Amino acid sequence: MPRATVSILVACAAMAVLSATPTTAADCYAIFGGVTTPDGAGLEGVRVSPSGGLGVTVTGLDGSYRVEGALSGETYAVEATLPGYAFVPAKRVVVVASGDEQVDFVASEINSGMCAVETTAAAPGLAVSPQPVVTYPTDTGIVWHRNRSYNITWGVFAGANVRIELRRNWTFQRLISAGTPNDGSFSWLIPPGLAYRSDYRIRISSTSTVTDIDLSDHVFRVAPLAKVLFPSGPGLEFPRGIPVTITWQNFTGTHVKIENYASGVFEGQLTASTPNDGSYTADLPFEAHLASDYRIHITSVGAPGDTDKSNNDFSVVANPRVVYPSTWGIAWNRGSHYSIKWADIAGPHVKIRLYKGGVLSRTISAATPNDGAFVWSVPVGQTPGTDYKIRVNSTTVPESDWSNNPFEIAATPLVIYPNASGTAVDHGSQMLIQWQDFPPGNVRIELLRWGLPVQLLKSSTANDGAFMWKVLPACSSTGNGYRVRISSVPHPTVSDTSDGNFTITSVPIVVYPNTKLVTYSRGSTMHIGWRGFSGLYVKIELLRSGVVERVIAGTADNDDYHTWVPPAPTPVASDYRIRITSVSAPTERDASDYLFSID
């Protein structure tokens, strides 16, 4: 059943006591509005926080909200927040006059990568009163278990006692305490019959002051105990480097991390993140010492409190073997350094040789200390190929091992474009990034400025030698010093960075509406955004089939944002665009890239 818009009601009489000027019930109004995405769709679950003690509300399914109790003549700072979104405006200060005040926001998802989000500081001299607050559980990813006790904590509530309730999102579920001392903490034993769900919240209210109420910021989960299933039994032994399938159940979230411990001390990480599908096959690392006191620890990536370890110790035993390179898909570059690794081979020294297609290519070392590792610089003149193997053997006893699988010695990877100083690209335009000679597997593309990463352009894309990047103003500022770095996804040490710096230049651009298949209704609010125009004012026009249908604003403030309600006489059509022109520099002009509809 759709949830209605959430609103908070503050008694006007109570607010009047806080005001320096006597008020009456007629002086009490509401702050209301909506939060939409750039295409006009309402956004649910946005936390809207007016200052001045009005409390906090959350938008409903249609993105609307309403907060009662605003006093005439008072000033309020209204802010919208939701993880993963940036808001325009970030914060708005309103003065309540003689009626309800509308404050709307437009929410845009933050691009992946390292985009900075601009924020607006609070108005000078505007005091924000302390708010009653649930302090735990309030973060994301919290998991509780039945038959265990957890501390619920809070702060800034009035009165001697507080009431604590369990909610499913906003709906009452059960009473935890009708009145417990307002000392900031309450220990709750999760009942054995409480349903396993992921939408629980804690609601705390003062038993003496009806306006002191707060709800957990995020939902938490009550779930079965997470368990490591294998290895968990007694007496298990595993040779070093041999694949072991680890299994588990009841962990929270989409991914888990798996670690190896010896005598309770961290030994090594088998994986930082793997899908939470109950099974992961890993080689026990050769760096692990031979011992009988190992246990596997598994932890939810999104909920660190959701963790478990093997019930019993298991043993890691000797296994003479070439450790690296040995798995499929390894690629080395000529001119780069790599550490050849082995273990459990007898004798004080070992010999290391390189074979290509089963034929000796070169002796890497005739005798090196048997310490498990040797750093080799691949000669620049080594013949590229995909059929190489390493053989390590003892110099004193007939004991040796080969790489389990062939590996590649590849040509040098190279960023082809951009790769020369003086290259320039405009905001809103597209740049073709090109590369060659990277090993098999996808590549990662990053934007650097003065040598530091500033934006992740693509975490993983096909290694086909070309990627089209649209330069987004929200992530990349104008200026010089930019370069592109490309890395192999399966082999992160294999990478190259463009040789020369390039420049990002600014051009006036319509930001939204600027996506495909957007429709606005006559009589509803339309949000218009732009960037890069000079001067104090801009002209905003509605185009239809390239012809001016109407002037929306002849001189609008050049603050990158404007709202407009299409009037009833506006023709129903699907070939509209928005055009922005600088009033002081008419040659600065841009129109939406895509058509939108008005119905």
Image (spheres, helix red, strand yellow):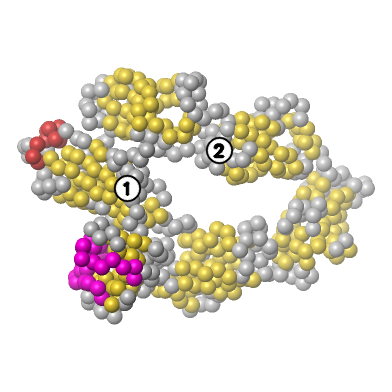
Task: Name the spot of residue 186 as percent of width and height, x first.
Answer: 38, 22
Image mark count: 2
| Residue 370 point in image, percent of width and height | 82, 48
Q: Which mark is residue 237?
A: none
Residue 115: x and y, percent? Answer: 43, 58
Q: Which residue lies under the disc numbered 1?
A: 62
Q: Residue at x 77, y 27 (%)?
A: 235
In three-dimensional space, the C-alpha distance between marks 2 and 1, rounded to whole angstroms, equals 33 Å
Q: Could you tell me the amino acid type at mark 1? A: Asp
Name, please, the residue furthest toward the bottom: 587
Disc 1, SS: loop
* Residue range highlighted in magenta: 548-575
190 or 404, nearer to the observer: 190
Q: Tell me the crowding category of disc 1: few under 14, some 14 to 19, or many 20 or more residues within 10 angstroms, Cα based.
A: some
Q: Is residue 326 above or below residue 70?
A: below
The type of residue carrying mark 2 is Ser
In reply to whether residue 404 is colored magenta, the answer given is no
Residue in the image at 70% along x and 32% along y: 231
Q: Is residue 445 visible?
A: yes
Q: Nearer the N terminus, badge 2 or badge 1? A: 1
In reply to whether residue 553 is colored magenta, the answer given is yes
> Residue 300 has which mark?
2
Disc 2 is placed on an element classified as: strand
20 left or right of 311 in image? left
Q: Main secondary structure of the magenta part?
A: strand
